[in-house]
Image (cartoon, rainbow, N blue to C red):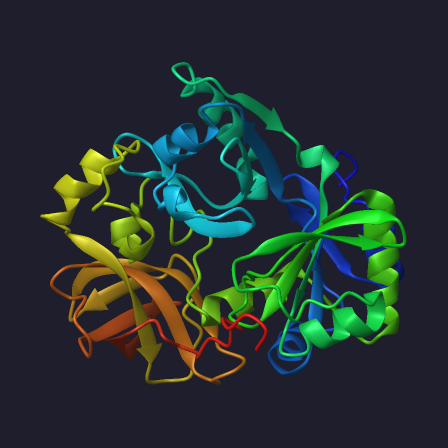
Amino acid sequence: MENLKKTCLYDKHVELNAKMEEFAGFSMPIVYDSIKNEHLAVRNAAGMFDVSHMGEIIVKGKDALAYVEKIFTNKVSTLIDGQVIYGMMLYENGGVVDDLLVYRFNSEYFLLVVNASNVSKDYNWIVENSNDYEVLIQNASEDYQEIAVQGPEAEKKILEALNIDLHDLGFFMFANYEYKSHHLLISRTGYTGEDGFEIYAGEEAIRDIWDVLLKHEVTPCGLGARDTLRFEAALPLYGHELSADITPLEAGFKFFVKLDSDVDFIGKNALIAQGEDLSRRIVGIELTEKSIPREGYEVYHNNLLIGHITTGYLSISVEKPIAMAMINRPYTKKNTEVFVKVRNKMIPGIVRDKKFLEKKYNKTKGA
């Protein structure tokens, strides 16, 4: 692990005896105490994640709005200053370059927050497609460090620890704040299904904020719990539910694709064509026996191979063996009987929706 990148919180993780492993070229904490305990801390109180490995790409200039509209599936034109929106960037064939968040500062300044494993690829793709637009594109990933604070007590803990009142920060909004003369950018989005915030700042501020939150009993959480939490909330992970080979329509994310707009975004025509003949899609699966349906396991209907698991766990919150799986039609209908091949044993299950857990976002400003 000597050649891996390290976030500014690396030594904090080591001090807490975190299990460190490679992720997206970084040495990252997978677990501190136990995935279960960290998972439940976020569901019941508040947890914090070092997500400084995420990528940040700035698009600014006279044509910034038009260009982001061109490369992004969702309705950027409807954003107001200080608003965030989720969507994807697509290849011409409809496959996903990456899924990301777009932050609008104004019509000439956007921040794109992308997956850590895709930063270089995303940056190059964005630059390559910008020739007809007057924009400046900057990979600002080195300038941003980030802590995600998630859970029903996240707002309260940030107020107690940092004296920052986020009561009026709306869902999928962001604003600038000050902490001990440090500039912070804080948004309210999340990747766990719970209320939560992303704190962006420089290294010194992030290190200080981590320590203060720790003193206020915000549980440090690793990437293991981050994955179990996002899975229960049916949120995608690039390379699993979305990829260059999986379109947003196949993944069930048509809601985040502006097919009805006048904007001819890259990949739109391929999605329109696919929408008329969608041959597979990602569904939920629940096993009727206690077994763990892991990524890559094959799914069968009778003796016919019909798909594979993209993510699966023995869910911590609902205590059921559940999964998301890419399944061929017509076997995507609810209550279709299936079998998941687990170590050469066929485990029975049924197709179900992906609403494994009720999301608890705070969508009311000032609520």
- Residue 89 point in image, percent of width and height: 39, 38
- Residue 14 point in image, percent of width and height: 85, 56
Q: Is residue 134 above or below residue 83?
A: above
Residue occupying image coordinates x 46% and y 70%:
233
Could you say which quadrant of the image residue 305 lies in?
bottom left
Could you say which quadrant of the image residue 76 lies in?
top left
- Residue 142 point in image, percent of width and height: 72, 34
Quarter of the figure with the C terminus: bottom right
Quarter of the figure with the N terminus: top right
Q: Is residue 90 above or below residue 315?
A: above
Q: Is residue 74 left or right of residue 332?
A: right
Residue occupying image coordinates x 63% and y 77%:
36
Do we see residue 218 in this rendering?
A: no
Q: Is residue 225 above or below residue 277?
A: below
Q: Is residue 146 above or below residue 263?
A: below
Q: How many marks?
A: 0
- Residue 172 point in image, percent of width and height: 52, 58
Residue occupying image coordinates x 68% and y 72%:
154
Residue occupying image coordinates x 76% and y 69%:
158
Do we see residue 336 in this rendering?
A: yes
Is 101 or 362 nearer to us in this picture? 362
Could you say which quadrant of the image residue 140 lies in?
top right
Q: Is residue 66 left or right of residue 58?
A: left
Is 330 or 171 nearer to us in this picture? 171
